Image (cartoon, rainbow, N blue to C red):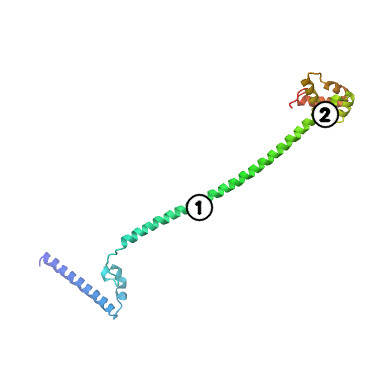
Amino acid sequence: MTAGSIISGLIKVIFLILLIFALMLGGLYWFDYLRIIDYRKVIGPFEQYLPAFLRRGEKVEDDPHLLEREFLGKKEQVLEEKIRGIELRAQELDEKELRLIEMEAKLVEEAKRLEEEKKVLSEKQREYDNYRENIKKQAEYFVSMPPQAAVERLSKMDDLLVIDILRQIDKNAQETGTLSIVPYYLSLMDPEKAVSVQRKMTKAGGIGNDDS
């Protein structure tokens, strides 16, 4: 017996075995159809290894809507991604809006604070202007009095107020080109009071120096 005949015999045997196996499965499937046996219980453990046409209830058919479903599935996925992007963008815009609202509230508070500061400064400026106007009037008033009477009144005042009045008297004298009477007032004052006033006037810039 040659090797070729042996191989040919083996092929025939294998073919017959496969044929018998297929006939057995077909018989089982037919008996299941007739409800004599349960096809799935018999071949269940091996069903996944069988070709599709031997699996119960399965038919090898082309799905005419497969490409359409895949296209629609991808399109739906793209739309979902766009929706997520829009939602994220909306969330970012909401956060920016909240930050803008907070910033606006801070700016409003800052504007109120600046307005209050402006009012305070305006009030202080009015008070200062009123004070300077009062100093000018008092300077004119004291110059119109007899020197001794003026000194008596000045001696009873606070040193800083006296200094402002004396400086205004100095300034008025410079503007009119007349001799200032301030040194004479100081000579008539109590020596201790005069020294205190002169020392403070020197620290503040001296007699005759007025920044107003």
Q: Which residue is mark 2?
A: 138
The answer to whether residue 196 is seen in the rendering is no
Closer-to-camera residue (174/210) = 174
Q: Quadrant of residue 24?
A: bottom left
For the point 53% across and 48% down, which residue is it?
96
Quadrant where the N terminus is found in the figure: bottom left
Q: Position of residue 197 (x, y in %)?
A: 82, 26
Left or right of 196 in this view: 106: left
Dot 1 surroundings within 10 Å: few (below 14), some, or many (20 or more)? few
Which secondary structure, mark 2? Answer: helix
Location of residue 44 with respect to 91 vertically, above or below: below
Q: Quadrant of residue 108?
A: top right
Looking at this view, name the residue that lies furthest to the left. Answer: 1
Disc number lying in front (2 or 1): 2
Which of the labelled discs sits on residue 10, or is there none? Answer: none
Q: How many marks do you count on the picture?
A: 2
Left or right of 114 in this view: 101: left
Q: Position of residue 165 (x, y in %)?
A: 81, 27
Label 2 – label 1 distance at C-alpha: 70 Å
Q: For the residue marked with disc 1, what is the amino acid?
A: Gln
Q: For the residue marked with disc 2, what is the amino acid?
A: Gln
The answer to whether residue 140 is seen in the rendering is yes
The mark nearer the N terminus, 2 or 1, is 1
Location of residue 37 with respect to 210 vertically, above or below: below
Q: Position of residue 38 (x, y in %)?
A: 31, 77
Closer-to-camera residue (24/10) = 24
Left or right of 62 in this view: 212: right
Q: Which residue is mark 1?
A: 91
